[in-house]
Structures are given as structure tokens and as C-alpha cells.
Amino acid sequence: MKYAVGVALAVLASLGCAQGPPRCSGMRVRRNAATLSAQEWGAIADVLRRMHDDGWTTRFGASHNRLFSRVHGNTCFFPFHRRYVLEFENIARQYDPNFVVPYWDATESFRAPASDPMLSPAALGTNGRGADNCLADGIQGNMQMSYPNQHCMRRIFNGGGGSINPWYAPEIISSYIQSDTSLAKFREDIEYSIHGAVHLGLGGEMNTGYAAHDFSFMVHHANLDRLWWEWQNAHGTFLMYDGTGSNGPASLSDAIPEDSAVPFGGSSVESVMVLGYGNVCYTYDSGPGAPNSYPSGGGGSGSSAASGSADVANRALESEGIQNSLSGDAISRFFPGLSGVSLRRRREAARPCTRSEPIPFPPTLTPEWISMHGYDPVRVVEAHRNACELVELLNNSTYVSPY
Ligand SMILES: *[C@@H]1O[C@H](CO)[C@@H](O)[C@H](O)[C@H]1NC(C)=O
Ligand SMILES: CC(=O)N[C@H]1CO[C@H](CO)[C@@H](O)[C@@H]1O
Ligand SMILES: [Cu+2]
């Protein structure tokens, strides 16, 4: 019986007739973490302490560690982490009904990540201290972990050395959003770039399978989730779920892998594809809101280039520069969303355009990180080479990055 219902739903979904989950009646808005006040960080710290005392830090860290190989290195990366951060938010809201996970746009400080205001004592805290690299300040300062053994919450910038390599420039992420026409490709580009760079840059707890101990994990993954949402909107591919899932060929009816320490109640991948529907009752302050009706289609392969709706509008400043500096061939390869688009400058995007330094090359993933995730090293190297080619192209041109 259950099987028959499942098949019927799958058939409906494949015909594009599914109504989808109902629209949320209440919607929360995830904000850019850089806009939070000291008081708001204080409220988050309070929730994290109380959740920690109740064992939630351990449950989130342990479940992420146990599910590790199923939810990284395949397309399930996005839906799993969307569901996982949502579950964290839902539980935190039992402690404080106003709690919403903010997102950390880690491209904002890509040139000098260690001086990002997020890594200050007022927010996520600075580098770890002492022989054990214990996090000693910030909202989780001096927290003691019990999984997989007793230790302090650790942070080790770059894995040692006290500084953090430059991260990925906003232009590179824009290029992924515009040029990737399959979710499988977008997943590779994001997971092998900014995802890994931030984990490895912070190091310590963040360089382990139980990285979710560190609240940096939640704000970082909320940001990756926001980028997925921008990508979904830019291409109209709300329901695209291609490539390999956690358990063979990716299918919207796949169950999201879960662990008894943090149960998801059997959520399907399909149930988390669209913000503002079903249980996914949040949007981002930067990006497109929830669509007015549940999108149909967009699940097929080979969608056309980005309409540019989301990202081009948000990043008008860089876009104008790129349009004027690169050849048509380079634009159609790296920034297809800009082809033939006339840009409207966002009023509040008036950043001073004074940078003259070239964009730094992005860091590579460590061999340990690659093998820990079971990534195909050839794909990782290819993705990095592509990003470097774009950086070189921009550096060689008359383009001046506003970031
Ligand atoms: C950038 O310029 C250098 C030196 O002229 C050249 O060797 C390289 O191929 C250029 N790179 C790209 C991506 O155009
Ligand atoms: C990272 C990188 O490619 N840097 C180069 C960018 O272009 C300037 C000017 O051509 C070079 O001096 C940098 O080395
Ligand atoms: Cu993860």
C-alpha cells in the first residue's frame, strides 16, 4: 500500500502535475550575520549554551559525522544541509522563538579572512589558544565537547600558522551561479571551493566530521544554502536534482539521509527544494523571496543560461565592470547571465570602487580533506584550475574588482 502510494506520487511528480507542499503561513528571514547587533549575538550565545547543556551540540556533531560519506561528494550535499540547518533552527526556536540562523557571506572578506568581523570576540570568536588551540572567546568561547572524546572546542586557522589564506572572490561564485546549468556541476563547484576553503581556513573543529559543533558551520552552510537558492532562481531550476544522490542516481523521491540523534522524520529531497513551502519556512534577506506558486518543471536537464535575475541584480557593480572588460567569448563562458542584459544598478550597492590589487588565487583543498570526503581528486583539481583561470582572466583585463 505504502509502495503504491509512493509510486503514484513519483509518477505525478515526473509529470510535473504535483501540487507540491503547501505555502508556509509564517516565514522567517535569515539575515546577513554581518548586520547582527551585539545584543543579537548575545541572544544567540544564550541559546547555544542552553542547547549545549541539553546535549544538542553533541547530537548535531555526531550525526553529521556518522552521515558524512553519504552527504558529501554527491548532489545530496545541498538538500541534506538545507534540512540539517533547518532542524537546528527549529530546535533552537524551542529555546528562543525569535532565533533564526544568520548566514555568513564568506566572500565579503575573501582577501583577508582572519580579519572578518565574524571572527571577532563579539561574534564567532578568534583563533584558538594554547597548546590545545581551544576557542577562548566569541559566542562559544571555552565550550567543552564530549564527542568523540573529551576536548575543548578547537579552532586552528589554516591548520596552523595563525593566518587564513585568501578565500574565493565574489566574482568566482557569481560565475558558478551564472554558468552552471546542472545542479550536479554547481554542487561540485561550491563544495570544492568556498565550502572547503572556509572549513579549512577555520580549522580545528571545522576540519573534522563533527564540524557542526562550531556555530560557524551553521552560518557557513546557511550561506551555501542561500547560494543554492540564488542558483535555483537564476535558472528557474527549482526542482532540478541530477547527478548522483546519496544512494545512486539522484531522484527527488530519495529520502534525505538521517541519524537517530537528529531525526528528520523521513523527509524527502523533494520536500526541501523550494523555500517558503512545506516545512521550509524561511527566505534570505538578500535574495529572491518564496515564489508565489509552487514551481513546476525545471527538473529536467540542460536548462539555458541564467536569466540573471538574482545574482546580476545583486552584484551590479561587479557586473558592469566585467561587461566592459572581458571579451564576448569570456563572458559567454564565465558570465553567460550578463550576455545581453542591461543592468540596473542597485541603489544601496554603492561600494567605493577603489580596489586596485589583483584578485588573489583561491586556496587548494588539502589532500587529507579530499580523501576524508572521498572526492574525486581529478574533479577537485579541475574545479580549482577553472577558478584560477577566471582569476587570471580578470587580472589580465582592465577589470578592477570592487571587492
Ligand atoms: C594572462 O596573462 C599572462 C601573461 O601575459 C598569460 O600568460 C596568460 O595566459 C593570461 N591568462 C589568461 C587566462 O588569459
Ligand atoms: C593572482 C594573480 O593572477 N595575480 C596577478 C594579476 O595580475 C597582476 C597584473 O598583471 C599581476 O601582477 C599579478 O601577479
Ligand atoms: Cu557537511
Image (cartoon, grey):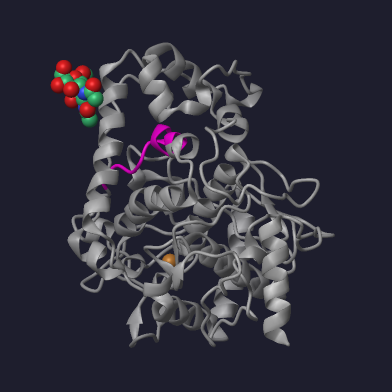
Provide the residue span drawn in magenta.
165-175
Residue 169 lies, with reference to residue 127, above or below; the image says above
Question: In this view of the protein, which residue sits in the foreground, 179 or 93?
Answer: 179
Horizontal arrangement in the rendering, residue 376 relative to residue 17 (left or right)? left
Residue 176 lies, with reference to residue 313, above or below; the image says below
Q: Is residue 400 visible?
A: no
Question: In this view of the protein, which residue sits in the foreground, 361 or 330?
Answer: 330
Q: Is residue 98 magenta?
A: no
Residue drawn at point x = 57 percent, y = 52 percent: 240
Residue 88 lies, with reference to residue 25, above or below; the image says below
Q: Is residue 173 magenta?
A: yes
Residue drawn at point x = 63 percent, y = 56 percent: 39
Count of marks placed on residues: 0
Residue 326 lies, with reference to residue 56, above or below; the image says above
Horizontal arrangement in the rendering, residue 385 relative to residue 106 (left or right)? left
x then y, percent, for residue 101: 60, 60
Where residue 247 sits, quadrant-wise, is bottom left
x then y, percent, for residue 82: 57, 62
Residue drawn at point x = 43 percent, y = 19 percent: 322
Where residue 54 sits, quadrant-wise, is bottom right
Q: Is residue 307 visible?
A: yes
Horizontal arrangement in the rendering, residue 186 relative to residue 127 (left or right)? right
Residue drawn at point x = 38 percent, y = 85 percent: 147
Horizontal arrangement in the rendering, residue 200 relative to residue 318 (left or right)? left
Instruction: Point out the image quarter for the C terminus.
Output: top left
Question: In this view of the protein, which residue sits in the foreground, 207 or 133?
Answer: 207
x then y, percent, for residue 351: 52, 23
x then y, percent, for residue 370: 25, 62
Quadrant where ligand 2 appears: top left
Question: In this view of the protein, which residue sits in the foreground, 209 or 181?
Answer: 181
